Image (cartoon, rainbow, N blue to C red):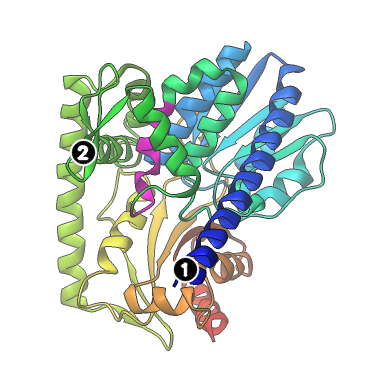
Amino acid sequence: MKTMLISLSNKFISHLAIMVYRLEVFEASFRGAVDALRKRIGEAVLIHHDEADGVCSAAIVKTALEAMGYSVKTLCLDKLFPEVLEKTLSKYSVVVFADIGSAHVKRIGENLRDDCLAVIIDHHDTHPTSRSNLFNLNPELYGFKGESDASASTVAYFFAKTVDKSLRRLAHLALIGSVEIPGEASGVNRIVLDESLKENLVKQSGRDFKIIAEGFMVSRVKASQTLTILASVGYYRGGVEKALEACGKGFTPETLSFSESLEEERKRANKALLASIIRRGIGEMRSLQWFDSGNFFKGMGSKVIGSFASYLSYQRLVDSRKYLVGFMRIPREIPGYGSLETDYTKVSARAPSDLRLMIENGLKPPLSKILPEACFKHGGFGDGHSVAASGAIPVGVEEKFLGTFDSLIS
């Protein structure tokens, strides 16, 4: 028994030492990016995702860039459309990505001019880059798992601390952003939780944590839900700006009221769409099942189709062994950018419970691999995690996409 305990103790110490080493190497990568940014103080464009993790990441990074002396223009996207990426990289000399971009590091590198600088702060599946003016700050490249060890806002928090240690005061934002990762905080996320408690920004409240930073006084789950609703459901109605403002000043009664009205609107749409799917049935193929949201989410950002797909994946009418795919038409207009040249359909895919276990055990291919490939084969693009991913394809190729996706699963 004593020998077994010593062996287990040694394994724990060894595991801890490896994690500490990985963290040190990861933190060193931030210093390189910050040093490069300090040499180019001026205007920067910050592209970020449209849910709580993306909003919190953007708020943290924006504060850090402004502390360095940058003037920052923000652009919120659900997907990193190639035409938006190319135009932005051709127009601006410094572009920073938050909670978006890692899956498209190759495309970013191909379009990045030699005299420009790009920094990606993300946690989605990715690849390394050899470009000296492109920094891919991603835990996946340093032995951590983006799905469980570090949210994008956690990565943003480490970036901010590298810029200025006093920005530890933003730890609660990283904690809010990391709500999207289920279960107790682990890996790098655990450090954020510990520092949030140490800075007296949060306190334990039952099984959750209450944000006690000035202007908040809500649970971190409630804060996360509110920011996601503002940025996604209210995407075309100034919701993103309200969400970013809330990260800095807290939730005003007006902001909370607006969020509640948006949530009621989304609930009605969810209920109506679910009733439609129950009535008409869900589309079935050999290895997947699918649905089209039609006009149920009209006026909302396309992130809502992913939220609905996640919800639907737990319902009884869904086959828990098959991939679940949902479609939603994307409006051409992008707030703060202009109009897209192409009409796109959003594709959101989720792995229901039994399929999730098969993917985790290597018995089925991860969505992060097959969804982007299927999108690419039909003129689109995609990214995500192993059990939850999304993409965009040109309008009109949905049926062909489903056939390709189904064949890739096999």
Categorize mark 2 by other alpha carbons within 10 Å: few (<14), some (14-19), many (20+). Answer: some
Residue 254, given in percent of the width and then of the height, sits at 18, 21
The residue indicated by pointer 2 is 262
Identify the residue at horizontal 21%, vertical 48% (top origin).
266
Q: Which residue is mark 1?
A: 2
For the residue pair 283 and 349, the one nearer the viewer reads as: 349
Was residue 220 drawn as part of the magenta stretch in this picture?
no
Q: Main secondary structure of the magenta part?
A: helix
Is residue 178 toward the left or the right of residue 257 in the image? right
Residue 50 visible within the image: no
Per the model, the C-alpha gap separating discs 1 and 2 is: 59 Å
* Vertical position of residue 37 compared to residue 302: above or below: above
**Segment tinted magenta in the rendering:** 171-183
Q: Quadrant of residue 275?
A: bottom left
Front: mark 1 or 2: 1
> Which residue lies at the image location 47% right of the left edge and 73% below the top edge?
360
Q: Quick one: which residue is furthest to the right in this view?
A: 114
Q: x%, y% of residue 213?
A: 30, 20
* Residue 218 screen position, x and y as percent: 20, 30
Residue 261 at x, y = what percent? 16, 36
Name the amino acid type tagged 1.
Lys
Answer above or below: position of 77 versus 16: above
Q: Which mark is first along the chain, 2 or 1?
A: 1
Give the quarter of the figure containing the N terminus.
bottom left
Q: Nearer the viewer, residue 45 or 237?
A: 45
**Tag 2: amino acid:** Leu
| Camera-side residue of 362 and 350 | 362
Q: Secondary structure at mark 2?
A: helix
Q: Where the C terminus falls, by quadrant?
A: bottom right
Disc 1, SS: helix
Q: Is residue 15 left or right of residue 34?
A: left
